[in-house]
Image (cartoon, coloured by chain):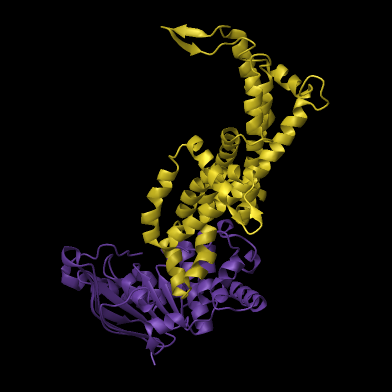
Amino acid sequence: MNAVDVGSVSMIFGDGASRVEALVDVNLGVAQGSFVSLIGPSGCGKSTVLRLIANLLEPTRGEIRVQGKPARQSRLDQDYGMAFQHAGLFDWRTVTKNIELPLELKGWDRATRRERALEMLELVRLPEFAGHYPWQLSGGMQQRVAIARALAARPTLLLMDEPFGALDEMTREHMQAELLRICRETGTSVVFVTHSIPEAVYLSDHVVVMSPRPGRITATIEVDLGDRQGDDTREADEFYKKITEVREALRSDRGEHPTGVEDR
Amino acid sequence: MFTVSLLLVAVAWESYKLAGPADGGSLLGWRVLPRANDRAMPHVWDMVARLADPERRGSDTTVAQVVLSGTWYSLRLVLVGFALGTLVGFGLAVLMARFRLVERGLLPYLVVSQTVPLIALAPLVVAWGGRVSIGGWVWPRWLSASVIGAFLAFFPVAVAALRGLSSASRASLELMESYAATWWQTFRRLRLPSSVPALVPGLRLAASASVVGVVVAEISTGLRGGVGRLIIEYGRQTTSDPAKVYTAVFGAAVLGLMMAGLVGVLDLVLSPHRRAEVAS
């Protein structure tokens, strides 16, 4: 059973003159424990795919199954955790209380919640910030808390929409390494939306290349960098080869320049 | 800081008295400057001294005691009015935030409600109140003044709370949706706490509005015992005792200050994370 199965999904927004074909016939499978990145220029529908998987949107046509269940059921069962570009922590809650939020909604009791939240803080290496408020943390720390929150209920799937997009390059690389470590430790499958080619290549088992008007998948590139070793991996020939491959896949689409995709 | 500004007001008052024309300044037949004589503008020290004088010739109670007890009487009415107005205003905001249809239908009426002249409304409320008696409970006269205070207070609360309750970001709402949270869970954990920053200025307006409402209602319904009544009573004595009416105005000002203080305390209670910010 795949963690995610997207079968012949089309998504149309609006009607008449404002009708937009956001996605046309998208097929995607995410194996258990694998890391899949969606990459493409702005407007290619990569975030829409993620929101469809999260059941925040209903597809116009096609079927989405998460952990073998219809997407809606899977949302109700809390099979996935989600993290966005902005950490989106609640200002009025301490770090611990923010991480406890999904557990509260599941009706966990106070002691178990607290225990899990502290465990999660260990995982993202912020145990000394348990009682702080979000505004007392740097952007990178806030994003780590958001990841801890997404993972608190031990979902089998993590959905991430450009979670490191607002971070500086140093923090970003550090966070990528942390994310891979956490996924390895927890065995979580990940669907990751990004517009950075090196980020997609570094993190993923599969990079799914998408193109706009109408949004569709144009290529899927398999990446095998073995165990990532930080800077060593980033400087390996294989890493550059894959970056070139993804870049060419993005460019080959109708010969257009892939606007909105970063080379960093 | 507060003492300094109080002193500045007193200094400004006295300097105008010193420099301003005793019979006021006229320009082309229009009086543009107020008279600065002792009858129109008594000295600040006269007003303060008046506080310690007996209220009536030969009586034991001082003006200060009368004004204070009037202020205390009015304060209770204001508190009831403020609480009532906040409750109603917030309730309406919740309804409007929950059902868009209610917002569209109700909001125009709320705006219109605030254009009804208070003086016209006061006798009506008293008349309605006079007919209300539930079981053994009879509508007390003072409640009419509180209701009029509430009538002024609910509007800023409703508008501010509606804005606050709709201020949660799309991302936060989606996050709650991804947790399959119910409307009530989203309300309690997201909309309610995120409404506080917008709500507090509304409460501040409501606090002063309820003071104005109660004082005006006391005046126009002839309710005895409060600051409003004292302003009328002492106002009639202006010709013989110009400083006296200002003692009642002091009472009304103290009322406003106490309500402002109350909202300040509420603000601290409602936003613990900002309390931490202030402390660090």
Is B85 left, or right, of A58 in this rendering?
Answer: right
* Quarter location, residue B52: top right
Residue drawn at point x = 48 percent, y = 64 percent: A87
The location of residue B72, given as percent across then percent down, is 71, 39
The answer to whether residue B188 of the structure is visible from this angle is yes
Which residue is more in the foreground, A248 or B16? Answer: B16
- Asked if A257 appears above or below B155 in the picture, the reply is below
Which residue is more in the foreground, B152 or B236? Answer: B236
Residue drawn at point x = 64 percent, y = 78 percent: A109
The location of residue B246, given as percent across then percent down, is 66, 23
Which chain, by letter, is yellow?
B
- Asked if B269 appears above or below B179 in the picture, the reply is above
Residue drawn at point x = 46 percent, y = 36 percent: B117
The location of residue A9, given as percent across then percent down, is 26, 81
Residue drawn at point x = 66 percent, y = 57 percent: B136
| Residue sticking out furthest to the bottom | A1
Colour chain A is painted in: purple
The location of residue B176, given as percent across then percent down, is 47, 70
